[in-house]
Amino acid sequence: MTEFSFSCVGVRADQYAAGPTLVFRLRVNASERTRVHALALRCQLRIEPARRGYDAEEADGLHDLFGGRDRWGSTLQPLQFAQISLMVPSFTGQTEVDLAVPCTYDMDVASTRYFHALSSGDVPLLMLFSGTAFTGDGGFHVEPVPWDREAPYLMPVKVWQEMIDQHFPGAGWVRLPRDTMDDLLEFRSRRALSSWEATVRTLLESAATDALSQTSERSAP
């Protein structure tokens, strides 16, 4: 049976993609002199948050995912990032291929909130591989890629930040239910507000005024 091993040798943001996309450079090794006609590969990417440290600001940003630091011993569990299929073309011995991973800036997704909370350093990833290989010199042999094939990788946080800045420069993204969006549209139209930023700021200022008023009422003799 052919022995396969995998490693990640780099990552970049795809500046030509229609949406946020990371491109990981994978190195695939097969047994020496083994002819691989094709490799139908499956790759699961996980974030392993326990493999790095966090400053106070990052810890605050991760509170909704993992709770306070006193709970991290039990809550700092792996997060699912992506699951991608890839067809690796014919090679002998070793080859390198690009693994394109579409991403989202949806803050309802745990992996996005994790990336957003980090200011610097690396994101500890674990790539888990499986699939089917078609090998042989004088014909085709069908072999499974063992489920225990994996490769750790430290992805620089700045690569994620560059990717997001390409598609959402200086901005964020929030997904809302349709009825909430309809209410916001009505509020914006009624106030003749020029942008979504002005709409949200008006609501925040109104909420802050209400909170201050309630505080004053409670403290009045």
Image: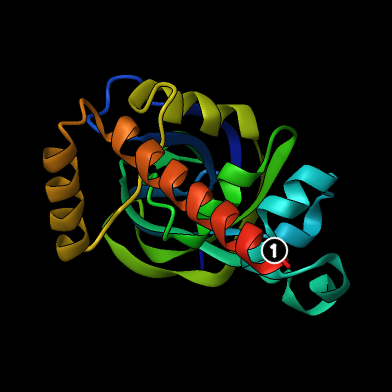
Front in this rendered view, residue 45 or 20: 20
What residue do we see at 18% from left, 47% from top? 187
Q: Is residue 5 visible?
A: no
Instruction: Residue type at mark 1: give it.
Output: Ala
To which residue does mark 1 refer? 220
Residue nearest the viewer, comparing 159 with 34: 159
Q: Is residue 194 above or below residue 134?
A: above
Residue 70 makes an appearance in the image: yes
Q: Position of residue 107 (x, y in %)?
A: 44, 53
Q: Where, by quadrant of the figure, is residue 27 drawn?
A: top right
Few, some or many residues within 10 Å of mark 1 (<14, 14–19, 20+): few
Residue at x 67% of width, y 41% of height: 118
Marks counted in the figure total 1
* Quadrant of the image occupied by residue 150: bottom right
- The residue at the point 63 percent across, 34 percent down is 157
Name the residue at the bottom extreme.
Answer: 74
Residue 161's place in the image compared with 206, above or below, is above
Element marked by disc 1: loop
Residue 116 horizontal/vertical position (percent): 57, 43
Is 10 displayed left or right of 164 in the figure? right
Q: Image quadrant for the C terminus? A: bottom right
Q: Is residue 62 left or right of residue 45?
A: right
Q: Residue furthest right?
A: 70
In x, y percent, where is residue 37?
31, 48
Near-viewer residue (56 or 201): 201
View extreme (front): residue:
221
State which quadrant residue 49 falls in. bottom right
